[in-house]
Image: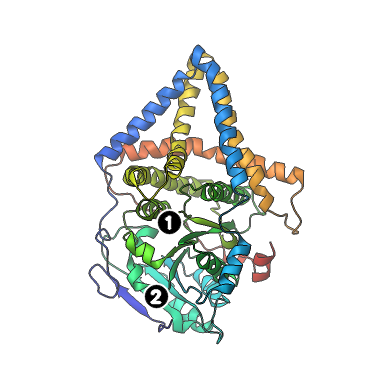
């Protein structure tokens, strides 16, 4: 796998990086989606208001408790028996005739302050052949940057000794759609040279075994894998710590779904997919607001593929450092999840590649999007009627589900000094992530409302990076 460090121009129609049909389109909102979002919002709120009625109010607490425990226990048990364990992945790679090669793909817009560290982390990967040559390449899409991101990447590649396997693709053009998914269209599968495409954010940090550990899962038969997302500086602020535990909880949930044969999903930082599979489902799409779950649904519907959750393949990233930034990011995630349901839900449910259990898992998982609106309706009903029992029971069920899963997932975590969390620390962190996840009760209804009234394209607001001084050193990353 060889390449010359260079900047390739990419613009609509440029033959150096073929463009899929929707690359130059804005993310428009079909009228049917807007109507559906309004109906879901209004219908769920009306259903919530009905729970304050005397007869229904007696049944709701029992149903809520049953659903909560019926979800938590199977997921918690299944997360302990993944289809591919880290040990099995290690043995599969050791016995493989030819280890898989990788294209590490990064979309970067004005990321000069952080991308140098990512290049350094890629350069120290130990996934190499016996001669010490990299079994990977690095491709960075410089998406209209004005801060010199592309030249910084090339200079860092020379300095760290991987200039022969580094390319920068410059994405330029007028009135192009924004967002990570749109940026990745400049590096469609035919541009990539590795067997597996790995998507990282520009602020990602990796230890030296990242690609080697990931290779084991593909050697063991996986076609789609996602890394475990970790948060840098998690011990410095309440908000960063809550995001760290949120990612751990999310990993528990999707690892359990994977083990139960459900439609487990990618997460944006650490997507890993075989290049042939990515190509077969149409590559990257500029119209995907959330490219991770968009691709998850496409590979599920097309090939019945489940996303393997690799708990020992870790990618570290900066936290969102302000509540305003967090609110905007979560709004985008929520609207992207709703759009995914409208666009790909019918294909997933009709897919002959998926078992009935997988499709039921999909319905159950996306059904949670209606719960926050139901809770808001129940709150209104409680105020109007004075009957609060149903609202209280639903809140306990919703929050309790998060708390129980959070407690169980925190078995993966250690304290800052490396020792296992004691019961009081674990309880405190489970409570923190439970309170934090209450944000979704407000975010999802607002996302439904925004989608219902949206008449033009979405303007993507990227997260600001740059706290490079707080990023841990290699030893700190691997030692946590």
Choose the circle earlier in sequence order: 2 or 1.
Answer: 2
Q: Which mark is residue 462?
A: 1
Q: Are marks 2 and 1 in contact (CB under 8 Å)?
A: no
Is the residue 166 above or below the residue 287 in the image? below
Between marks 2 and 1 in the image, the one whose residue lies nearer the viewer: 2
The residue labelled by disc 2 is 193
Q: Is residue 365 visible?
A: yes
Task: Say which of 137 and 243 sits in front.
Answer: 137
Residue located at (64% from left, 70% from top): 474
List x then y, in percent, for residue 186. 33, 67
Q: Secondary structure at mark 1?
A: loop
Residue at far left of view: 13
In-image side of 165 versus 211 (left or right): left
Residue located at (39% from left, 75% from top): 193
Task: Say which of 91 and 274 sits in front.
Answer: 91
Residue located at (49% from left, 78% from top): 135
List x then y, in percent, for residue 125. 56, 75
């Amino acid at each position: 796998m060889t390449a010359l460090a260079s900047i390739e121009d990419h613009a609509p129609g440029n033959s150096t990086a073929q463009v899929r049909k929707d690359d130059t389109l804005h993310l428009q909102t079909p009228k049917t989606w807007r109507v559906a979002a309004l109906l879901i919002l209004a219908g769920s709120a009306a259903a919530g208001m009905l729970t304050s009625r005397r007869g229904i109010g007696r049944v709701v607490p029992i149903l809520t408790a049953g659903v909560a425990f019926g979800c938590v226990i199977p997921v918690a048990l299944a997360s302990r028996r993944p289809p591919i364990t880290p040990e099995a992945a290690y043995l599969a790679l050791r016995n493989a005739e030819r280890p898989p090669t990788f294209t590490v793909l990064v979309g970067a817009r004005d990321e000069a302050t952080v991308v140098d560290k990512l290049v350094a982390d890629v350069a120290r990967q130990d996934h190499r052949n016996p001669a010490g040559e990299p079994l990977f390449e690095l491709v960075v899409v410089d998406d209209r940057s004005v801060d010199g991101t592309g030249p910084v990447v090339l200079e860092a590649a020379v300095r760290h000794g991987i200039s022969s396997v580094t390319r920068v693709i410059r994405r330029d053009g007028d009135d192009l759609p924004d967002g990570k998914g749109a940026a990745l269209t400049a590096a469609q599968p035919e541009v990539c040279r590795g067997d597996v495409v790995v998507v990282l954010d520009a602020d990602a940090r990796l230890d030296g075994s990242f690609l080697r550990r990931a290779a084991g899962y593909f050697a063991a038969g996986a076609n789609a894998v996602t890394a475990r997302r970790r948060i840098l500086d998690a011990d410095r602020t309440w908000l960063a710590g809550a995001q760290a535990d949120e990612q751990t909880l999310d990993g528990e949930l999707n690892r359990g779904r994977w083990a139960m044969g459900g439609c487990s999903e990618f997460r944006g930082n650490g997507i890993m997919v075989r290049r042939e599979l990515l190509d077969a489902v149409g590559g990257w799409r500029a119209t995907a607001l959330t490219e991770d779950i968009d691709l998850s649904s496409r590979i599920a519907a097309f090939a019945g593929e489940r996303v393997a959750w690799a708990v020992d393949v870790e990618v570290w990233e900066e936290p969102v450092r302000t509540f305003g930034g967090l609110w905007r990011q979560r709004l985008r995630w929520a609207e992207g999840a709703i759009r995914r349901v409208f666009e790909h839900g019918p294909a997933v449910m009709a897919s002959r590649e998926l078992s009935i259990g997988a499709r039921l898992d999909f319905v159950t998982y996306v059904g949670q999007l209606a719960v926050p609106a139901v809770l808001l309706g129940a709150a209104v009903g409680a105020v109007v009627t004075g009957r609060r029992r149903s609202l209280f029971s639903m809140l306990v069920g919703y929050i309790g589900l998060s708390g129980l899963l959070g407690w169980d997932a925190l078995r993966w975590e250690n304290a800052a000094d490396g020792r296992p969390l004691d019961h009081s620390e674990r309880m405190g962190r489970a409570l923190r992530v439970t309170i934090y996840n209450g944000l979704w009760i407000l975010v999802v209804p607002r996302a439904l409302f925004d989608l219902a009234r949206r008449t033009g394209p979405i303007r993507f607001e990227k997260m600001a990076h740059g706290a490079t001084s707080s990023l841990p050193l290699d030893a700190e990353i691997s030692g946590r």
